[in-house]
Structures are given as C-alpha cells and as structure tokens.
Amino acid sequence: MNGGLARRYARALLGLEPDRSVLDATGDELTRVADAFAEPRLRAVVLNSGIDLDARRRIVGEIVEQLGVSTDVGNLVRLLADRDRLPILGDVARAFEAMVDGALGRARVRIRTAQPLGPAEKTEIVDLARRLVGLDVVPTTDVDAELLGGVVLDAGGTVYDGSIRTQLARVANEMAGGEG
C-alpha cells in the first residue's frame, strides 16, 4: 500500500519539475533528505506521537532549512510530516529516482566484483551493461570478496552472474548429478 502512495507523491513532485535538467538534482536532494530523516535519533523524535504535532512540524521545517533543499522538496517533506507520512519518505525518494530514470531513458545497474575495478575495467563493464539493458546506465559498484572473481550485474532485478563462485557451484551441481 505504501508503494502506491509513495509513487503518487513522487509523480506529483516529478510534475512540478518541468525542466528535465534539474531532475537529477531534485532526486539527489530528496535522497539526502530521506537519509537525514532515516537517522534513528531524528526519526524517533519526528515520528513520536507523544511529542506535540506543532513541535514535530517545527523540527521538520528546521531540518529541511538546514539541509538547504529546493522549495519543492522542502514542501513535499513538510506535507508528508503534516499528514503523518514521513515514514514513506525513503519510498518516495526511490520511486522518484525510478521515474526520473524512466523519463531520462536510463537504468540503474549494480556491479559487484571480487576486487575493486580499475578505470578501464569499469568502463568495459559499464559498456557491457549498456549493451545488455539497451539503455544508458547509472552504475554503482560494490566489492564482494565472496564472488572469488568475475562480475555480477544487477540491472533492475535482472541478474547477470559471471562470478567464479556461481560457476563453481554449477560445476559442483553437475558433478553431484552425474554421480547419482
């Protein structure tokens, strides 16, 4: 249920941004605000119904001001606070990011490798990801030593696993099946 509600707020914010060149900046601001309000001590205050609603609203307004976000993002956060919907702020940020990616014709791709990538390797893997998904990609890279080697690409839930760990598991399964 919160997913649909979060998408409605994200769509409304997207509709306020007629200039496509500011969509990424708006998304970055929204993510930054969501991260700030996810901080456990702050979250405990702004979501505590035992604290006067006006006091919580003032705190939210002060945090928004300190973060120096745009008027549209600030108004969205204040609206969520007024409607007791701050818990979905992270969902709104993720939904907005996905909508911006769709509007700009790109996909987010998570690249996991056993070792950190050098610039040339990263460029090569990003090019591969671009060919696989057929869109421009926004890559994030993670190091996962458990992969042993190779690479795993996660493009919007579609996983391309070229890790040595998976290849070894596949060989082990084939060997176990061949003995029976």
Image (cartoon, rainbow, N blue to C red):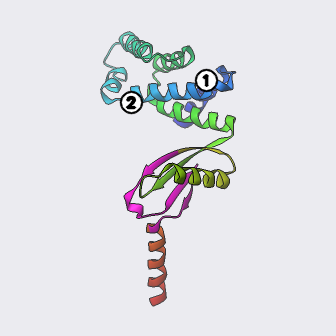
Image point 46% across, 68% down: which residue? 164
Residue 1 seen: no
Q: Secondary structure at mark 1?
A: helix
State the residue position of label 1.
13
Magenta includes 27?
Answer: no
Point out the tag, 1 or 2, that comes first from the N-terminus: 1
Give residue 66's position: percent from left, percent from top.
41, 14
Of 69 and 179, nearer the camera is: 69
Give residue 169's position: percent from left, percent from top.
44, 73
Image point 61% across, 53% down: which residue? 129
Quarter of the rendering containing residue 9: top right
Q: Which residues are magenta?
A: 140-164
| Vertical arrangement, residue 170 with respect to residue 131, above or below | below
Quarter of the rendering containing residue 108: top right
Give residue 84's position: percent from left, percent from top.
45, 22
Q: Label 2 is placed on what type of residue?
A: Ala
Q: Label 1 is placed on what type of residue?
A: Leu
| Vertical arrangement, residue 36 with respect to residue 125, above or below | above
Q: CA distance from mark 1 to mark 2?
A: 20 Å
State the residue position of label 2.
38
Density class for disc 1 (Cα within 10 Å; few <14, some 14-19, many ≥20) is some
Magenta includes 152?
Answer: yes
Viewport quadrant of the N terminus? top right
